[in-house]
Image: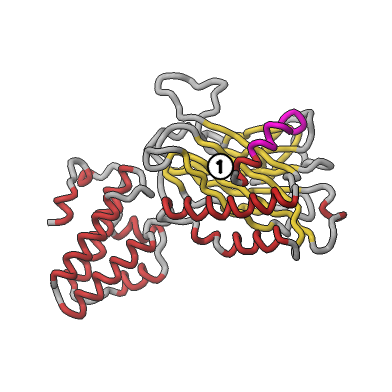
Amino acid sequence: MTVWQRIESWFHAASEHVTVGFVPEESATALAPYEGYIRLFVAEGFLADRRSWAADQYPALHGGVSLSFLGGQPLAFTTMAGQSAWLAPGVTLSEPITPLLPYGGGTVSVQAGLYRVSEKGPLGTAVQIAGGLAGLVAPPLAAAATIATKLSEGIDRILGDLGEQPVLGVHWTMVAPVPGTPGSGVRTVRAGHLVVINSPEPPGALSIEDGRLRVDGRPPTGADFLVLRIECRAERDDWRFPELAQLIDRAGEEYLRRGETQTFRDLRSDAVVRAWCSPDLTPLDRKRVAVLVAGEIDEVRRLGVVSDEDQALDEDRTLEEAVALRLPSRDAPELDGLRLADLLA
C-alpha cells in the first residue's frame, strides 16, 4: 500500500463527516487533453486545535496528482512536507505540491491528507527525508513518479506501524471534457480551488477572494479546513529542463573548444531529439521546445561566442526571455508541417 491509497481509503470512510466543494476560477474553461498542464498547490489551511498540540508536533501534508502518463496506467506524483505555518486561519501558503504535469486525457485525481507528526518520531524523520527529496519530483517525470512511489511506500509502512490516520483529507476526481456537451454536473478538468472542511454540514456558500477561503463572504471560523489550488495552463513557465540545459551547454562548450566536430553534431541532435520526444511536454510544445533548443545551440555556432543575451538567458531564464528570443508561439506558421528531420539537417 502507498500513502495515496491510505488517504483515499480514509476519505471514502469519512466522506459523510466532511464537506467538500470545488470553486472554479472565474472564466475557467475545461482543459482539453494534450492542450496543457496541471499543477497542484496547497493554498490555505487551518487546524482548530493546532495550538493544543505538543511543542514538538506539527502538521505534515501528503498530496499530489494522479493521471495517465506515457499512455499507460495512472501515475501518482506526490510529495510530503511539514506545514508548520498553520497556526491561524487565513495564512495563504500557495506552495506547489507537484510540478507542471502534461494532461493527456482520462481521469485526473487530486488528493491531500494532513497528518500530525512528532518531530523526533519515525514519521518526523521520514517527513524530513521526503522534504529533502521533493526537488527530485521534477522532469524527467517518469523517474520522478518512481521516486515518489518508493517514498510513499516507505512512509506508508511507518504510518501502518504507528496506526496514524489523517487529521483531515480529501480525494477528488475529474474527467476530460466531452466535445459538444455542456458538461453540466460533470467534474471536468479545470482550474479552481478544492476545499475540504471538517464539518458534516456545509457551513455556508464557499467562495475564494484574493486566494483565501470565504464562507458566506466571511473568513471561516471554528472548523479545520484545507484549500488546494488546481492550476491548468497552456503555457509552461519552465522550458529549460536540466537534461536539455546540460546538452545545450555541452554542445556550446564543444563548439567553442573544437569547432564543428562530430561530437558537437551528436550533442545537438541528442538535445533536439530529446525535446521532440519529451513525455514531459504536450505534443505541440515538443515541437516548440525542439525549435528553441536548436536555436540556442545554433546561435553559438553562428556567432562563435556566447552573446551577452545568451549568457543572461543561461543564468536566469524566464518564460518572457525564451519567448522573445526563440520560442515559437503556439500558432507560429513555422510549426505547420515541421519534421524532426528539418531540425536535424
Q: Which residue is painted at 70% across and 44% down in the image? A: 226
Query: Which range of residues does the magenta coloring cover?
Result: 8-18
Q: In the displayed orientation, state which residue is furthest to the right.
A: 52
Q: Is residue 345 left or right of residue 190?
A: left
Mostly what secondary structure, the magenta segment? helix
The answer to whether residue 228 is magenta is no
**Could you tell me residue 309's position as x and y percent?**
32, 70
Front-most of residues 133 and 296: 133
Above or below, 77 against 171 in this view is below
Q: Is residue 9 magenta?
A: yes
The image quadrant that residue 123 belongs to is bottom right
Q: Quadrant for residue 300, please give it.
A: bottom left
Is residue 120 shown above or below 208?
Answer: below
Q: How is the image coloured?
A: secondary structure
Residue tagged 1: 230
Neighbour tally class for label 1: few under 14, some 14-19, many 20 plus, Cα within 10 Å? many
User: Does residue 177 sit above or below 2 in this rendering?
Assistant: above
Residue 235 percent across, percent down from the top left? 40, 47
Q: Amino acid at mark 1?
A: Ile
Q: Nearer the viewer, residue 243 or 204?
A: 243
Q: Helix, strand, or loop for circle 1?
A: strand
Q: Nearer the viewer, residue 310 or 255?
A: 255
**Residue drawn at (87%, 54%) of the image:** 52
Q: Quadrant of the N terminus?
A: top right
Q: For the point 75% across and 47% down, which residue is it?
A: 163
